[in-house]
Amino acid sequence: MELLLNLIPFIVIPGVLGVFAYYYFGGKKIHPSEENQTPLFQEQAGGRFDGFNLTIPFVRHSIYENYVVIAYGKSHFKLNFDQVSKVEVKRHLFSKGITYHHNLNNVPFDCIVWSKKPDEVEKLLKNKGIKLVNKHNPRST
C-alpha cells in the first residue's frame, strides 16, 4: 500500500500536465478555414460550451473578416457571420461573457467566450453588422 501511495505523484502530475497540454496546445491549432488568413482579432480566452467550462488560456477566440473561430482541445467551431443571429454581452461572476447565438447543430448551443477584451470584440462585431445585445445596456445593437 505504501508503494502505491508513493507512486501517486508520478501518476497524477503527468496526468494533469497531459490534460493541460491537450487543451492549451489543441486550441492553438489552426482550423483549415484559417490557413493563409490573418485574424482581425485573436486572444486566448476561457469559455463555456453546453455546461463544459474552460478557463483562460484554454480557448482560442479568433475573429476574421467573415467569420469567428472558437477552438479548444480538438474542437474547432467556425461561425460565419450570417449564421450568428445575435451576440449577447453579459456580466457574469468574474468577467464579461460573449454569447454567440446561432442555429448550427455542430456548435454547442451555449457558446460563451470569457474574453479579456470584450469591448474590443463588441466594437469589431458591431462593425461587421452583427446584432449585439449588451445586458448592461439593452438598447445597444
Image (spheres, rainbow, N blue to C red):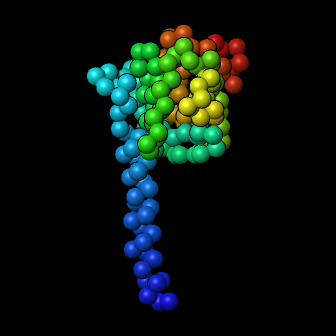
> x, y (%) of residue 30?
35, 33
Above or below, comparing residue 74 to residue 1 in the picture = above
Percent across and percent down for residue 125 are: 52, 17
Q: Position of residue 101 (x, y in %)?
A: 63, 24
Q: How many marks?
A: 0
Q: Vertical placement of 54 versus 86: above or below? A: below
Q: Can residue 83 be seen in the rendering of this structure?
A: yes
- Residue appearing at x 44%, y 61% in the figure: 16
Q: Is residue 27 left or right of residue 47?
A: left
- Between 91 and 108, the one nearer to me in the picture: 108
Quarter of image, res 9: bottom left
- Determine whether, in the image, residue 28 is placed left or right of residue 71: left
Residue at 35% x, 25% y is 34
**110 displayed left or right of 63:** right
Would residue 120 be seen by someone viewing this image from the given angle?
Answer: no
Q: Residue furthest left?
A: 36
**Residue sitting nearer the eye, 5 or 89:** 5
Quarter of the image where the C terminus is located:
top right
The correct choice, above or below, for 54 with respect to 101 in the image is: below
Q: Nearer the viewer, residue 73 or 123?
A: 73
Q: Is residue 45 above or below residue 34?
A: below
Q: Residue at x 63, y 34 (%)?
A: 110
Provide residue 109's location: percent of width, then percent of height.
63, 32
Q: Residue at x 58, y 46 (%)?
A: 53
